[in-house]
Amino acid sequence: MGRPAPTDSSSASVIAHEEAHRLAEAVRGLPHRQREVVVCRYYPELSEAETAALLGMSAGSVKRHGHRARAALASRMEGDR
């Protein structure tokens, strides 16, 4: 099923830290363009148009790389459980 509910805030903090570390490692494993799009879209929360302008690509490319990156991350994060 999933992990049991943490019993205290220190347990929750450890679990959150482990999840963040796993996610960071999964992002590092993405191809370069997918990683760039993920970082731009979710860290400073740039729009598709802003990300496209910053990275010198079309908005369609941003969508495509973002979709592929999310699918890869979901697969990796689920596979690590």
Image (cartoon, helix red, strand yellow):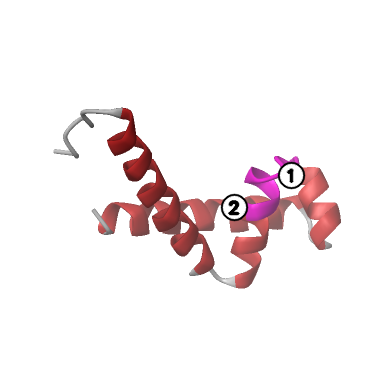
Q: Amino acid at mark 2?
A: Gly
Q: On the rendered structure, is 42 left or right of 68?
A: right
**Amino acid type of the residue tagged 1 in the rendering:** Glu
For the N terminus, the image quarter is top left
44 magenta-colored: yes
- Residue 65: image location, x then y, percent: 61, 58
Q: Residues within 10 Å of mark 2 (few under 14, many from 20)?
A: many
Q: Secondary structure at mark 2?
A: helix
Residue 66 is marked as: 2
Instruction: Say whether marks 2 and 1 touch (CB < 8 Å).
Output: yes
What range is drawn magenta here? Answer: 39-47
Query: Relative to 76, is 8 above or below?
Result: above
Q: Which mark is residue 20?
A: none
Q: Which residue appears at 75% of the width and 50% of the height?
A: 59
Q: Residue at x 82, y 46 (%)?
A: 50
Drawn side of residue 13 relative to residue 25, left or right? left
Number of numbered discs visible in the structure rendering? 2
Badge 1: residue crowd in 10 Å (few <14, some 14–19, many ≥20) = some
Residue 6: x %, y % from top left? 23, 32
Residue 61 x, y percent position in the rendering: 69, 58
Q: Is residue 61 magenta?
A: no
Question: Quick one: label 2 or label 1, which is nearer the N terminus?
Answer: 1
Whole-number angstrom distance, CA of label 2 to CA of label 1: 9 Å
Q: Position of residue 30 (x, y in %)?
A: 52, 67
Element assignment for label 1: helix
- 11 is higher (above) or lower (below) than 54: above
Q: Of residues 24 and 34, which is closer to you in this image?
A: 24
Residue at 80%, 44% (x, y): give it: 49
Q: Residue at position x 43%, y 56% from top?
A: 21
- State left or right for residue 13 relative to residue 51: left
The residue pinned by badge 1 equals 48
Q: Nearer the viewer, residue 31 or 9?
A: 9
